[in-house]
Amino acid sequence: MSHAGTETAPDSATATAERESPEYVRLSTAAAMTLGLKPGRFYRNARLHCLNLLLTYEGGCIAKCAYCGLSGERACAEADRSFGRVDWPLHSTDEVVARLDPPPAEIERVCISMVTRKRAVEDVKTVARRIREASDLPISMLVAPTLVPHEEYGKFRAAGADRIGIAVDAATPGIFDRYRGAGVGGPHKWERYWESVVTAVGAFGEGHVGVHLIVGLGETEREMIETIQRARDLGAVTHLFSFFPEKSSSLEGRAQPEIGRYRRVQLARFLIDEKFASARQMAFDESGRITGFGFDDARLDEVVASGLPFRTSGCPGKTVVRLFTSEVEVGSCNRPYANCLPGSEIRNFPFEPDKEDIALVRAELTAAPLPASGEGRPRRTRTSHGIGNLAGWWEV
């Protein structure tokens, strides 16, 4: 059984000097399946809507991010590296481009991810141009700001990209430095990433830059939500991930964040990105846990019932949902099961949640934190409808 909730055979292709980008790229397992390059089945019949590609080089990424499966410090063979929990088989760019002419009906976008290598700045543009020649699918780029001069953002747009992703990942400068910068001997700087967000918004426009953030690296809910607000104030939106321990990474033994914590941050992110509320209106307790969303309870209940906050946040595709007087773009970059195992606890829904899913989400939103021992998981006996102030009754 593959990591993406599919039945597949392992792929052991390794990038060499002759098999590097831009002539070769890696595809997520889900992308390889969708293009017919790998057999498999998605849990609950999910469908991929964004083709995720990753630039690849002999020796991999030079960064040393403690939680990342692509880290140059990871103790494993390059062919065994994962990214976002899933495997990324190697294929020729020619083969990928050929299968996009025409693309599978369910594919609405392509995203090309850089790694921290100097060559990647030019190669991401080359791959984008190749795709643009074969298809009119919108193209996103996930870029590595450490090696990207500010003048390059306009060139990324000229090469065919309509949106940019910047993986800040950490919610505070201290956590960023500990896991991405000096703490691991890595090259990344907190200030450089946020400067690049400003530059990218200037080149691509408000709402066309996605700041990636990972919940569960040691921040409080308040710290994460205030960082989401910072991104929105700069004209960017947030693409939210739940930490998942990558095998052989420095944080392999770290647990995922509690599901209730992740759900509350998801809901706050949605309200902030859609400008229904701001972090400045929200309430927090002394530990930084959110206790109020700064939004009318009845309307908040409608937001939860829509399921939209709990779907994968990413660059949009063709689906637009009306909520109140707003048109909400649904992410096409739905990354099925990229930060959770397929099963009952789906962190980011890659499809529209059903009524049973929403009932579970409501319970998770008001869940009491687990005791420090990890024992005595709360058992729901009754919950109120007061999600706005996180009211509820629990038996432990």
Image (cartoon, grey):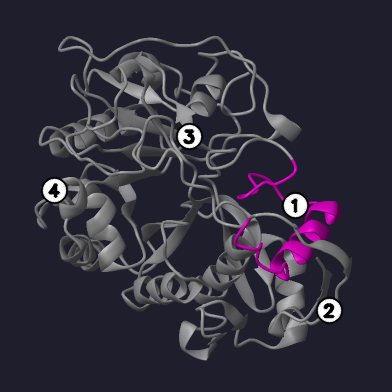
Residue drawn at 62 percent across, 83 percent down: 291
Residue of label 1: 353
Task: Check disc 3 and report the residue beneath it.
Answer: 85
Q: CA distance from mark 1 to mark 2?
A: 19 Å
Q: Earlier in the sequence, mark 4 or mark 3?
A: 3
Q: Earlier in the sequence, mark 2 or mark 3?
A: 3
**Image x and y of residue 8, in percent:** 59, 14
The answer to whether residue 333 is above or below residue 356 is: above
Above or below 319: residue 342 = above
Neighbour tally class for label 2: few under 14, some 14-19, many 20 plus, Cα within 10 Å: few
- The residues bearing labels 4 and 3 have C-alpha atoms spaced at a distance of 23 Å
Instruction: Give the Cα separation between the discs numbered 2 and 3.
Output: 35 Å
Number of other residues with Cα within 10 Å of mark 1, as a class: few under 14, some 14 to 19, many 20 or more: some
Examine the image and state in which quarter residue 135 appears: top left
Q: Amino acid at mark 3?
A: Arg
* Residue at mark 2: 385
Q: Which stretch appears magenta? A: 344-373
The residue lying furthest to the right in this view is 381
At x 79% / y 53%, what residue is drawn?
357
